[in-house]
Every structure is written in structure tokens, then in C-alpha cells.
Image (cartoon, rainbow, N blue to C red):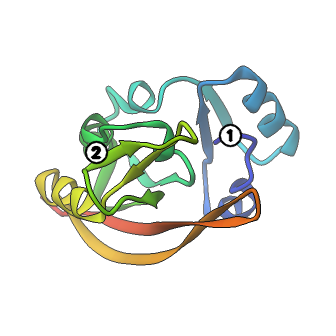
Amino acid sequence: CGTGLCAPLLRPMARHLVGVDLSPRMLQIAQARGMYDDLLCSDIVASMQGRNADIDLLVAADVFVYIGSLEAVFEASKQALRPGAHLAFSIEADEGADFTLLPTRRYAHAIGYIERLAAGHGFALVECERRSVRDNLGQEVPGWVVLLQRERD
């Protein structure tokens, strides 16, 4: 959840809003926003392990840029999401390899890689939009905003 910038957008839609971040400092800032029901200091994959398909929506805005291989994230997301539930996220665009560590120390991912992971883990592509995902020193960073739906069993 970082500092909780998405919380004001998600709160009106949520019965129960949980934020997850590795950094206690980020969680303190998120807590000050007063939008979350729970905040967990945890790794994204660890926070979903052991869940039994009880989540309606997972949002990872500007999160996957800190993770190279997304295999474990997709596997844990499948376990955590109810059939028919959604996974929404942004990625920085890579035109070559599945994922690449950039000089910014952030990862970029190829949309083909995302499509293969989705298909291999039981997700249907609902929407995929090419757009700038952030600003870096006055330059727009090209990326993708993706919405997947967990297929029904």
C-alpha cells in the first residue's frame, strides 16, 4: 500500500480495506490517512499465502516494479481471490525480456509475460491499457494498467 495514495479511491468500494507493505515507515504514513481497516507489515506473497479464496479485489499500483519474477505473486493471487474476483495492477513496460531490472532499480515487465502468467494461473484478461504509469524527473514512464479476472472454477 505504500503511503496509501490509492486508499481514498478504494475506500468507497470496500467493506474491508487492507494495506500491505514491507516498510513500517510507509505503513505509519498510510495509517495516518485513516482509510484502512488493517495494515500488515509483510511481503506481498506472504500476506496472501494461506488465504482461501476470500478476497474480491487485489490492487497493486506501482508495486510490481519492485519484483522481478511475478510467478509467485500470480500463484498467491489465485489462492487468495474468489472465483470471478479481480487483480488490478500497473507495470512499467519492457519490450524485450519477460522482466528487466532498469537503471532506476525498478523492474519493467513485458505485456506478453503478463498474458502468459495470467493464462497459466487461471486469469482472464479484462482490460489492458498502455499509458504513462508515473513521472520520473519530468519524463513520463511508459507502462501498462492491467485488469485480470480470476476464472470461475
> Please, what secondary structure does the residue beneath circle 1 have?
loop
Mark yes or no: residue 123 visible. Answer: yes
Q: Give the percent coordinates (x, y) of residue 142.
A: 52, 68
Q: Quadrant of the C terminus?
A: bottom left
Determine which of the numbered discs, if any, sits on residue 2 in the image: 1
Q: Give the percent coordinates (x, y) of residue 120.
A: 12, 53
| In the image: residue 82, left or right of residue 34 | left
Q: What crowding class fits label 2: few (fewer than 14 Cα within 10 Å), some (14-19), or many (20 or more)?
A: many
- In percent of the image, x 48 and y 66: which residue is there? 143
Q: Give the percent coordinates (x, y) of residue 94.
A: 37, 58
Query: With respect to residue 14, does 72 lie above or below?
Result: above
Nearest the camera: 123 or 63?
A: 63
State the CA–CA distance, disc 1 to disc 2.
20 Å
Under mark 2, the amino acid is: Phe
Badge 1 or badge 2: first in the primary sequence: 1
> Circle 2 is placed at which residue position?
74
Quarter of the figure with residue 140: bottom right
- In percent of the image, x 53 and y 45: which residue is there? 63
Query: With respect to residue 50, does 113 lie above or below?
Result: below
